[in-house]
Image: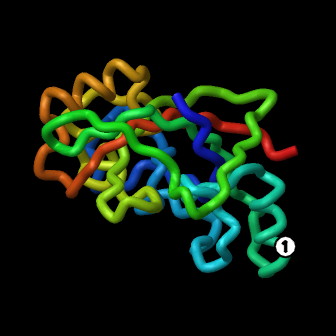
């Protein structure tokens, strides 16, 4: 897994339309349910994975633009080296024109693994487990994530996400990190 970056999110409890009984909240990478702290791309402080290299950069963006981050949860992500285009697994890399120098957290708590679409080839778009209610049909943990990388990979290979959203699909590990 490759260090991809950080995001501050406003985590929501399971929406009524999601029927997966074991899900308590949504800790997906996408912002469809649990929103990012802001529409951050316009500030151009993100890295080549369209995330942030450190929590300090998030704090700086929030401070410079008067964006409240109280009540947000901080997540750190790592990306699998390959993405699935619907047919084969292929290597992917960060946007080369944008610097990527992710600071690895000294402490992190694994929350699970998400499958995320990257059709536009930049920012994370959709997490079909939550966005498309695929968690209603597949086993996920209380955060609407797979418990293991192997589960995520197996479900992609088995076609569980076929027809949800245009790919490619990437597997990202989701870690919670304490704000310092």
How packed is label 1: few (under 14 Cα within 10 Å), some, or many (20 or more)? few
Q: Which one is in front, 172 or 82?
A: 82
- Name which residue lies at 64% across and 65% down: 37
In the picture as drawn, the residue positioned furthest to the right comes out as 180
- Would residue 81 be seen by someone viewing this image from the given angle? yes
Q: Which one is in front, 12 or 122?
A: 122
Q: How many marks?
A: 1
Q: Which one is in front, 57 or 82?
A: 82
Instruction: Tell whether 12 sits left or right of 40.
Output: left
From the top left corner, tell me how far across and down residue 69 is, in percent.
Answer: 75, 64
- Name which residue lies at 39% across and 36% down: 171
From the top left corner, tell me how far across and down residue 4 is, in percent.
Answer: 58, 43
- Name which residue lies at 26% across and 39% down: 84
From the top left corner, tell me how far across and down residue 141 is, in percent.
Answer: 42, 28
- Name which residue lies at 30% across and 44% down: 169
Q: Secondary structure at mark 1?
A: helix
Q: Find disc 1 in the rendering and name its residue.
A: 63
Image quarter hosting the C terminus: top right
From the top left corner, tell me how far across and down residue 64 is, in percent.
Answer: 83, 78
- Would residue 23 be seen by someone viewing this image from the given angle? no
């Amino acid at each position: 897994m490759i260090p991809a970056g950080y995001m501050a999110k406003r985590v929501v409890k399971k929406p009524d339309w999601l029927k997966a009984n074991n899900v308590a909240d949504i800790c997906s990478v996408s912002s469809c349910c649990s929103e990012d702290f802001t529409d951050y791309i316009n500030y151009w402080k993100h890295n080549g994975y369209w995330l942030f290299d450190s929590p300090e950069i998030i704090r700086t963006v929030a401070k410079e633009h008067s964006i409240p981050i109280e009540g947000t949860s901080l997540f750190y992500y790592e990306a699998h080296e390959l993405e699935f285009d619907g047919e084969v697994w292929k290597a992917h890399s960060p946007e080369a024109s944008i610097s990527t120098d992710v600071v690895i957290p000294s402490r992190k708590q694994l929350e699970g693994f998400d499958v995320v679409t990257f059709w536009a080839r930049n920012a994370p778009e959709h997490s079909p487990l939550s966005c498309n209610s695929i968690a209603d049909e597949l086993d996920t943990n209380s955060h609407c994530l797979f418990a293991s990388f192997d589960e995520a990979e197996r479900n992609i290979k088995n076609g569980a996400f076929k027809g949800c959203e245009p790919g490619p699909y990437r597997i990202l590990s989701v870690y919670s990190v304490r704000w310092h």
